[in-house]
Amino acid sequence: MASTAPTATPLTSGGQLSGSVHGGSQPVAFATVTLYYAGQSGMGSGDPSGGVNGAPIVAAVTSSADDGHGSFSFSKSATNGQTTSGNNFSCPVTGDPLVYVVAQGGNTINTHDPSVNNTAAVFLGVFGTCSQINASSFISLSEATTVASMVALQQYFNPVTESFGADGISISKRAIVNALSTISNLVDPANGTAITSKVITGSAGSASVTVTPQTAKINALANIIASCVNNASASATPCTTLFANATPPDTSVTSRPYRTAAFPQATDVLQALYYMLANPTNGSTTNLQNLYNLIPAVGSSFQPTLAAAPSDWTISVTYSSTSTCGTGNGNFISMPEELNVDANGNIWIANGQDATGNLSMISSSGVPNACVSLGGGARGGAVVDASGNVWYASRSANTISRYNPFDQSILTYTTAAAPLAVFADGGNGNGDTISNIYFTTDTGTSLYMIPHGASATTATTPVQISSVVGPYPIHIMVDSSQAIWVSSGSNFISQVTAGSSGSPNYLNGYTTTQFTVPTDSYGIAANANGVYASSTNANSVIPFLTGSATSYSIASGWPTAAGLGGLSLPTSIALDGRSNIWTANTGGSGSLTEISALGTPLFSNGLQLSSSYLSVGRSIVIDQSGNVWIANEGPSGSPANFITEVIGAAVPVYQPFALGLSNGRFQTLP
């Protein structure tokens, strides 16, 4: 996001935006600088054929000056909807779109010659929503700013029309606005340089969070595109090498919100950058190495940079904290076990710290805004229901607590044993959207229900609805048919549905049916097509079961081959908006696996992250902006104090799950 002075006020009565264009080591003069309103009729990448879906609107146009800085400016009219031209613009009367700027071409070699025009040079920056642009907004368009902006907004980019867009209403609009806030966790937009870390405080008492991006990888990407920018034309060797090796993704299996024909080869650095992020292994280690080799051995513009080629071009950020907070004086983040996303894109963290573990919350940009003591550490239980309540399972206190973030009220239920998993449905259908709550315990093999727990005024005794869900039922998920699926820790998963008293495994109105899967089921995820599980034994696979009613079996072509895509003791599973399967691996040095709905691995050996970014990933969740979040439990005896975000790597998915179940948006795009 553009930098804003603390005292700045929105441009309700007009004002000026400004910035500069700087490529690598040289200012860029005579570039065409265009101010856009992002499309509001659909995701910008939703129509790669170049149709109107998500098409942006040109708000104003100017050029960068030959003043040694590549300066440019735009003037905002005082009246919304006013007719404008040139470098003057006016916000629309309705819609409040995102405002972004693109600088194309120009003299990138600082020779002051207007006839020099490197058409491959394209820079990107984002000012924010139109109503909130401030009179002191300034943005430095550099390769680093371009990288950060594309990383954060990649799922909203159309690489054919080179434009951004999202639905202009409700959760999709909120998701793209949330994505914008991530940019300043990667770069300082006013200086055009990547940050190494920063400390954020919020409303969660004295708690603070340290944000640490993969700075060297951001700079490496910036240096790669700078190798093309700092030439007189797009035909220079660094440009042709970049375009030849930045391989477009295979759209039949990609982590993008579309399934369509192949994309053309890149012709400018913005397209090439998108392809590197959309296909982060670049199709082969040779291509990836060729791209890395574009970074000058000495004198690269952005430092520090990578010392060797990475395994992929994804960008991750950690959010760490050693602050204490809450009435129990526990840590804001310590041994995080489970993550959940609410309707605003906030991340709720169930901490496993013994006796003092908190329920904590950070905003989509890492601001610590809640810390609540609810009886002690969780083992895996936290969920957001359809009404926005957050449920927390305390194994220290043998309780399930409902926390209302709006009035901070707490309702606590006593459990027969230490609770393990917890999940919320979307109500009982036929207009009933009040979530029922389900939970398991870490002793026994039972599943319990809190009927209409989202609206309860007093804590009643939970109802046992199954006694045969397995020895370690650590994950629950409810599908769109209201069937409840439970992993077991053994070689089966359970489906619990409303049933008659004469059916097998009947208990208090519900029947349990078990389906065989490979050994030790752990993670579980369901959508309209079936249910996925993970196996955490030496035979590390993911089975996919399809069927209807109480008849399910492993689909043809499944389970995956052992170890496919880096599978190694996989834990929880998350499905994104195109049913790509994401899981964290705890075997070996740790990695993330992504497998398409067609069973194709998107990373041949998994997405590799150092121990500073992945440490025994216990839980994984996808948010409405396509970010992948991982709870890092840490090795035994050394609990981790951070969670990780892989920015924009997945297809956005509607959140929270319970709200999607209640309104017909379960496991769909936002």
Image (spheres, helix red, strand yellow):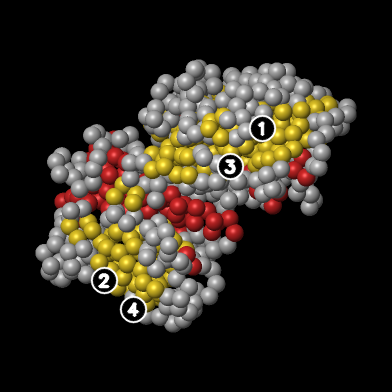
The part of the image, by quadrant, that contains residue 574 is: top right
Of labels 3 and 4, the one closer to you: 3
For disc 1, the marked residue is 374
Q: What residue type is labelled 2?
A: Ser
Of labels 1 and 2, the one closer to you: 1
Specify the label residue 86 is tagged with.
Answer: 4
Describe the element under mark 1 as helix, strand or loop.
loop
The part of the image, by quadrant, that contains residue 621 is: top right
Q: How crowded is mark 2: few (under 14 residues within 10 Å), some or many (20 or more)?
A: many
Q: How crowded is mark 1: few (under 14 residues within 10 Å), some or many (20 or more)?
A: many
Q: Residues within 10 Å of mark 3 (few under 14, many from 20)?
A: many
Q: Distance between the residues labelled 1 and 4?
A: 57 Å
Contact, mark 3 vs mark 1 (Cβ under 8 Å): no
Q: Seen in the image, is 358 located left or right of residue 220?
A: right
Which residue is the extreme one toward the right? 501
Quadrant containing the N terminus is: bottom left
Specify the label residue 370 is tagged with.
Answer: 3
For disc 2, the marked residue is 63
The location of residue 53, given as percent across then percent down, is 49, 64
Contact, mark 1 vs mark 2 (Cβ under 8 Å): no
Q: Which amino acid does label 3 sit on?
A: Ala
Describe the element under mark 3 as helix, strand or loop.
strand
